[in-house]
Amino acid sequence: MLNSIRPKNRVIFAYLLIPVAIYVFAVFVPLVTAGYYSFFEWQGGPNKSFIGIENFKTLMNDEIFWMSFQHNIFLVIACIIGQIGLALLFVLMINSKLVKFKGIHRTFGFFPSTIAAVAIGFIWTMVFDYRRGILNWILELIGQEEHTKVWLNEPDLVMLLIAIPLIWQFIGYFMIILLSAISSIDKSIIEVSEIDGANAVQRAIYIIIPLIKNTLLVCVTLCVAGNMKAFDHIFVMTTGGPGNASMVMALYGYKVSFMQQNMGYGSAISIGIFVLSLLVIGAFQLVTKVLSSDKEVV
């Protein structure tokens, strides 16, 4: 009876054909196209000259590109700590019996994730604005006028300042993921630990975190992937400045391709971003698995 109602293979194939075709068209076709154009000197238009791997040789010695890569790594580390770390802390607080109106906290926590990245950039640009920004206004209000400054023009601070909007925007996103993981934990395990005298910190370290380690690995992967292609709010806030102090790889590729009209080299940068992103994601996954396995041994 079950075999008679099971869909046939061609029906399953028909259902999967459209989404798979869309995925291939949206992901693989642009990637292959970028790889093709990266072997040409191309300023746009119909004329292009085949130059082999010269664009990749230039890329290997491009100081701005590697500086941009370092800035992306800074964003990744800052956001793993800020986004996932704070999200886990807030989730543990929300799950506490002392916290009331849990639904409201979840709703307002997730709200920034629904705002477009460009709007986030404008909001935080206004926060850091020298004349009308709330940050300088607070400093003046508490009598610290000497500490007011043009915040986004400070090369030593600008990467931290553009990391703050990213952290603020996606804390709620990771809160929802971690909330779903913690909700799946058998409540009897938590209750037994409470009876045994474990406090909130001990329950979090020795019970909750080990039980949701796979979800944490997913969160780390999403965080790394997202911050390796950071672009929108940085373009709005600083356009990579001052100088190249906040330049990231995606923004550099955009400037080379569309502002300098160097499409061939811009395509090579895109391939470089793709390869480096895969390597960084793999490295972080490996480190996370090693750390989790060490804790299991202990």
Image (cartoon, grey):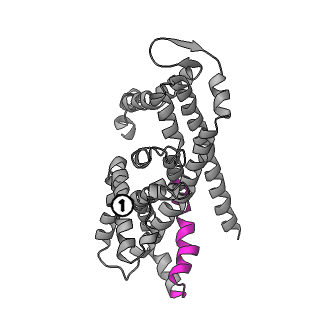
Check the image and report above or below for 271 versus 297. above
Q: Position of residue 12 (x, y in %)?
A: 39, 32
Check the image and report above or below for 121 versus 95. above
Check the image and report above or below for 270 versus 295. above
Q: Quadrant of the C terminus?
A: bottom right
Identify the residue at horizontal 37%, vertical 54% (top origin). Answer: 125
Quadrant of the rendered structure where residue 63 is?
top right
Identify the residue at horizontal 56%, vertical 80% (top origin). Answer: 202
Q: Position of residue 273 (x, y in %)?
A: 56, 37
Residue, far front? 146
Q: Position of residue 297 (x, y in %)?
A: 71, 67
Identify the residue at horizontal 53%, vertical 29% (top origin). Answer: 266
Look at the image and tell me whether residue 95 can be seen. no
In the image, is residue 27 part of the stretch drawn in magenta? no
Which residue in the structure is indicated by mark 1? 127
Q: Nearer the viewer, residue 237 or 20?
A: 237
Identify the residue at horizontal 41%, vertical 61% (top origin). Answer: 168
In the image, is residue 206 part of the stretch drawn in magenta? yes
Q: Nearer the viewer, residue 298 or 143?
A: 143
Q: Please name the predominant secondary structure of the magenta segment in the image.
A: helix
Q: Nearer the viewer, residue 242 or 95?
A: 242
Which secondary structure lies at badge 1? helix
Look at the image and tell me whether residue 293 can be seen. yes
Quadrant of the rendered structure where residue 109 is?
bottom left
**For the residue marked with disc 1, what is the amino acid?**
Val
Q: Nearer the viewer, residue 119 or 140?
A: 140
Q: Which portion, as a residue range, is magenta?
A: 195-218
Q: Position of residue 71 (x, y in %)?
A: 57, 49
Q: Quadrant of the N terminus?
A: top left
**Label 1 CA crowd tier, 10 Å (few <14, some 14–19, many 20+):** some
